[in-house]
Amino acid sequence: MSSSSDPPIVCSLPRVTIVGAGRVGSTLAQRIAEKNLADVVLLDIVEGMPQGLALDLMEARGIELHNRQIIGTNNYIDTSGSQIVVITAGLPRKPGMSRDDLLLTNAKIVVEAAKNAIAHSPNAIFIVVTNPLDVMTYLAWQATGLPRHRIMGMAGVLDSARFETFIALELGVLPADVKAMVLGSHGDLMMPLSGYATVNGIPITELLDAPTIERLVQRTRNGGAEIVELMQTGGAFFAPASATSMMVESIVLNQSRLLPVAAYLQGEYGLEDVVIGVPCRLGCSGIESVLELTLTDEEIAALKVSAQSVRKNIDQAQKILTTKM
Ligand code: TXD
């Protein structure tokens, strides 16, 4: 029991801000709240929309049996003191568009969001989701001035989940028994590593022939576009929200999970001053370490090509930002 001389008890729960309350952002808010991970602030530029979504999610709490607060807002003041900021603000792809086609519009949105969010949550860890993912993560890193362990992008967890899904469907096994890793940039040059994919420890090369594996690799590379083509109105959001919530969970619960994360590299894999997907341990301080896997010469060459394409888009975005902002 406390006495009057004790300091006041501050019961603060982790708070996650999600900038962009669209399909990925709102689904992520639901995942975080219903997993009981943190209170959530949903921010969007559209007035009333995040407030309405937050109220709707709050009204489900009694049924879903959690007590997390969900706030909807258009004002960054309400995001103050967040432990994690997730940026999903920006346009999604339309059929026929590549992720890179979003570069110009989304660069401005992400830089502005990152600056506003860091001003109100100077100790936060940032997770960028907006496409083109690797470039947006780099721009947000630059805009916030954060040390590299506190800013990362979500793509590899999603791309790996897609590869795992296609392997599980092909073999007719439980998806949770399949483990795979996709590295590189989040685009056509991503690198599903078939040599590291297993079904409960058994390499898939023991279970599937080379042409089948190649077909699944290609489907993974095309995974986002396949959904955009089917939906015609926007892209995937359920699996992207699940993938992001896995990263949030690993940070909030300090799980040190080893996940593919878009990270700023300083010499790892022979790459410098670029953001790209690599295996990282994620804990309460953010990226605890980057794991340098043994890759084949072919894979190292592919990673370099992937990084060069990200670098080219970073340079292009920076040119536009300096002339137009
Ligand atoms: O693997 C990955 N990283 C991805 C990335 C997987 C899926 C989606 N991916 C990308 O996330 C997608 O290509 C988009 O760039 C973002 C968000 O996708 P989402 O499907 O959620 O798009 P929506 O539904 O259009 O939501 C975007 C929201 C929308 O509500 C806008 O009003 C809001 O962003 N928005 C803003 N919010 C705050 N501040 C600003 N400036 C702003 N501009 C737009």
Image: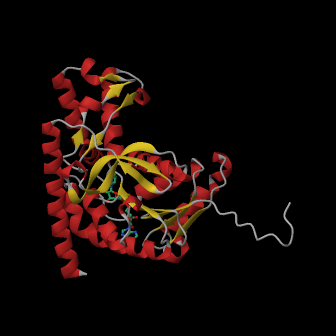
How many marks on residues? 0
Question: Is residue 93 something one can see in this rendering?
Answer: no
What residue is at 68 percent from the left and 50 percent from the top?
Answer: 62
Q: Quadrant of the N terminus?
A: bottom right
**Rendered view: 282 above or below 140:** above
Choose between 283 and 126: the one closer to the eye. 283
- The percent position of residue 33, horizontal first and vertical second, equals 57, 53
| Residue 111 in sight in this render | yes
Q: Residue 14 at what x, y percent from top left?
A: 58, 59
Q: Residue 234, position in %: x, y?
A: 31, 54
Instruction: Name the residue rendered at 19%, 58% in the picture.
Output: 310
Report whether 182 appears left or right of 127: left
Q: Which residue sits at x=35%, y=61%?
A: 148
Q: Quadrant of residue 119?
A: bottom left
Residue at x-position 28% and y-position 23%: 204
Q: Is residue 145 left or right of residue 74?
A: left
Residue 144 is situated, as x and y percent measured from the top left of the image, at 37, 72
As rendered, which of 324 and 291 lies closer to the eye?
A: 291
> What colouring does the structure picture have?
secondary structure
Q: Which quarter holds ligand 1?
A: bottom left
Determine whether, in the image, residue 72 is placed left or right of residue 160: right
Instruction: Please tell me in which quadrant of the rendered image residue 39 appears.
Output: bottom right
Q: Is residue 24 above or below residue 145?
A: above
Q: Quadrant of the C terminus?
A: bottom left
Specify the quadrant of the image occupied by residue 86. Answer: bottom left
